[in-house]
Amino acid sequence: MRWLPLVLALGCSCPKSEPAEPPKEEAHGHDDGHEALPQHLKLSAEDITRAGIRTAPVKRVALASTVVLTGEVVAQPDRSAKLSSASPGRLEQVSFNEGTLVKRGDVMATVRVPDVGRLRGAFAAANSRAKAARANAERFIALKSSGLGSDQALLDAEADARAQEAEARALGEQLAAIGVNADSGSGFLVALRAPLTGVVVMRDAVVGQPINAEHVLADIVDLSEVWFLGRVFEKDLAKLRVGAKAELQLNAFPGEHLHGTVDYVSQQIDPVARTLTARVRIVNEGLRLRLGLFGRAHVELADASTAAPQLVVPRDALVEIGEKTVVFIKAADGDFVMHEVQPGDAAMDDVQILSGISEGEEVVVSGVFTLKSLLLKATLAEDE
């Protein structure tokens, strides 16, 4: 009897029943031929505002024609400076390291300079002589006004006073050139101050070491704005233009896109590589970019509008979930519905969509990762 169910099962010649097809999710207000994926999110108006969710209509536009330039991030020369001592001496104190953020005028190091004492003494003596010569010239002016002094004596006194004052000024400027206030202070120590606001990217300073005017103690760079120098082949030169928009992708930050503008194309071709240099100005928000980072710049060409219109969405609308590329559509009832899409070509901030959505639908372009997190959180809750 225990084998009877097995015998009956083997002896049955009845046709197998097909598994029931799961019911299809109703499309939320879409009659464009694609079906909404079954993931829905309903958010309150307060949650939408807090998450910063914004939508934009799916539209058809001509993808911009671009050229890809490889290159690297460099500092702007006008935003770079070197710290050094104007006179030979010995380092007494160092108050910075690589990575230190400094402001213009901050004391970064102090140097003991033997010449300071000699210059201070010479300045004090010259200043005293200048004051005496000026007093003598004023005395001759008074004598001349009373009829007791000659014109020649007055001219000689004025000339001597001007000469003594010029010597004192010259010595004072020498002190100022090495960072010493000529009118106050004493001793042999000279403060080296930051020439600009930025970050220290190189330090070559050890307390006690002798230094001279050629010794660079630090490199300081203002990284709030940097350049990307891309290589341009001769065949692409005629298509480039100053002022063209550029989209930058760096190897260090895959998937992120920075934006800049071409502000210069070099006038001389590299005779070996047969390329020119295009300079793209990039605003370095958050100071994340580092000097020397390698990447590619997609630069919009002059004939950017000649292509046929394509169904596109902003690049920020796309997100990866598992192995799928999806977007979030705001349905007529206010729900956010996830749609799997097939992306095509990309240019600048736009990505062509081959399937999955239709023109006119409202796609989420800001707050996408918040919706993704909420969706995954809801999926995990259902699994529990």
Image (spheres, rainbow, N blue to C red):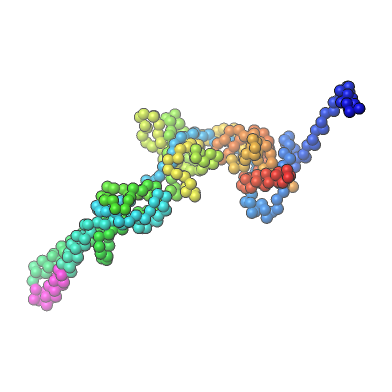
Q: Is residue 180 left or right of residue 307?
A: left
* Residue 290, position as x, y percentages in the image: 45, 44
Quadrant of the image for the N terminus? top right
Membership of 135 in magenta stretch: yes
- Horizontal side, residue 299 vs residue 155: left or right: right
> Is 14 or 295 nearer to us in this picture?
14
- Residues 83 and 49: in front is 83
| Residue ID at (67%, 37%) | 340
Asked whether residue 260 appears in the rendered view, the answer is yes
Q: Is residue 278 left or right of residue 255?
A: left
Do we see residue 162 in this rendering?
Answer: no
Give the answer, above or below, for where 339 lies relative to 138: above
Quadrant where the C terminus is found in the figure: top right
- The overriding secondary structure of the stretch rendered in magenta is helix
Q: Residue furthest front?
A: 2
Give whichever of 6, 158 is nearer the camera: 6
Q: Position of residue 68 (x, y in %)?
A: 49, 34
Q: Quadrant of residue 17?
A: top right
Furthest residue in direction bottom, as rendered: 146
What residue appears at the point 23 percent right and 59 percent down from the top-left corner?
Answer: 116
Which stretch did the figure color magenta? 132-149
- Residue 344 location in percent, x, y? 60, 33
- Placement of 305 over or under 92, stated as above or below: above
Q: Is residue 165 above or below residue 315?
A: below
Q: Is residue 16 magenta?
A: no
- Residue at left 71%, top 43%? 379
